[in-house]
Image: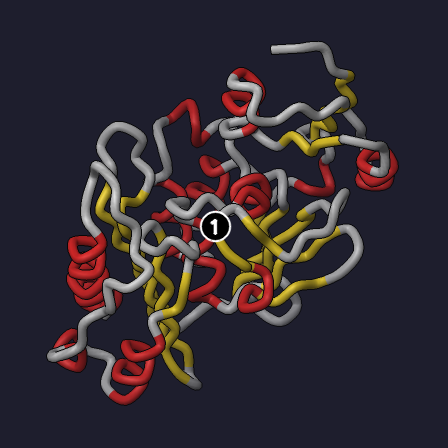
Amino acid sequence: MYNFDFVKPKTLAEAAAAMAGDEAQALGGGQTLIPSLKARLASPTTLVSLGGIKEMVGVCTGDDGSTCIGGATTHGAVAKDAAKLYPALAKLAAGIGDPAVRNRGTIGGSLANNDPAACYPSAALASGATIVTNTRKIAADDYFQGMFTTALDAGEIVTEVRFPVPEKAAYIKFEQPASRFALTGVFVAKYKDGVRVAVTGASEGGVFRWKEAEAALSKDFSAKALAGLSASADGMITDLHGTAAYRAHLVGVLTRRAVEAAA
């Protein structure tokens, strides 16, 4: 570690002002940032803690019926408080990491970091969520721009995430047993106007929508509708845990399982 300033604002306005400084970094639960600091992969001069901002914490139903989650809400709180509002999202949150991670990590931190194997990005993308920041609203389709890359500008803070609630949904992941990140994970959400399928953990480009599966499932929301469909291995991750072809195969298997679980 090294010397840096630590700021803990009580309001969003104070946080935004603190983030305007040179080399300032927002701190959610710190589950990714703190190890990065220890390894000197990140070197901000100021850490701005978002944990004490009450207006960024909580789960509620929006005026349009969407499930709204404050950016500083922990995974554990999402698992508990969203259980009746959006069960598939709550179940996803309950499967993130271990109790220590779930009680510290936040949804805003996860989406801002956009780890290619994180779970929340698939839920946001499959749900057609809106990521609300201190300056604007960003559609999930525009927000995720590649591995560890998002549409966020410097100093921008994820204050809330709004999830349209689907008719049916499920998330299935094949865990990397040590980290409990998704070796591959698939979130399927059925809405009145169609089905969205988002895949995490598999692609070098980060979370993505499997459009071919979406088209098939929008016509027939059943696992049999996916017969004959297979995800391309092009651009998939190859590492010591699995090859590109293996991950492509998992995409198909997990999508069928997610559809069965949702149905």
Q: Quadrant of residue 241?
A: top left
Quick check: 218 above or below 5?
below
Count of numbered circles on the image = 1
What is the quadrant of the C terminus in the image?
Answer: bottom left
Q: Position of residue 135 (x, y in %)?
A: 80, 55
Whether residue 18 sits left or right of residue 252 in the image: it is: right
Quick check: 51 above or below 153?
above
Instruction: Say which residue appears at 41% left-offset and 53% top-offset.
Output: 89
Residue marked by disc 1: 147
Instruction: Say which residue appears at 71% left-offset and 45% top-offset.
Output: 157
Which residue is at the front of the view, 43 or 192? 43
Task: Look at the numbered disc 1 and give the secondary structure of its residue.
Answer: loop
Whether residue 25 sits left or right of residue 67 in the image: it is: right
Q: Position of residue 223 (x, y in %)?
A: 16, 74
Looking at numbered disc 1 in the image, what kind of residue is underneath it? Met
Instruction: Say which residue appears at 12% left-offset and 79% top-offset.
Output: 228
Whether residue 68 sits left or right of residue 56 in the image: it is: left
Which residue is at the front of the view, 179 or 50? 179
Q: Quadrant of residue 42?
A: top right
Q: Quadrant of residue 43?
A: top right
Instruction: Say which residue appears at 12% left-offset and 78% top-offset.
Output: 227
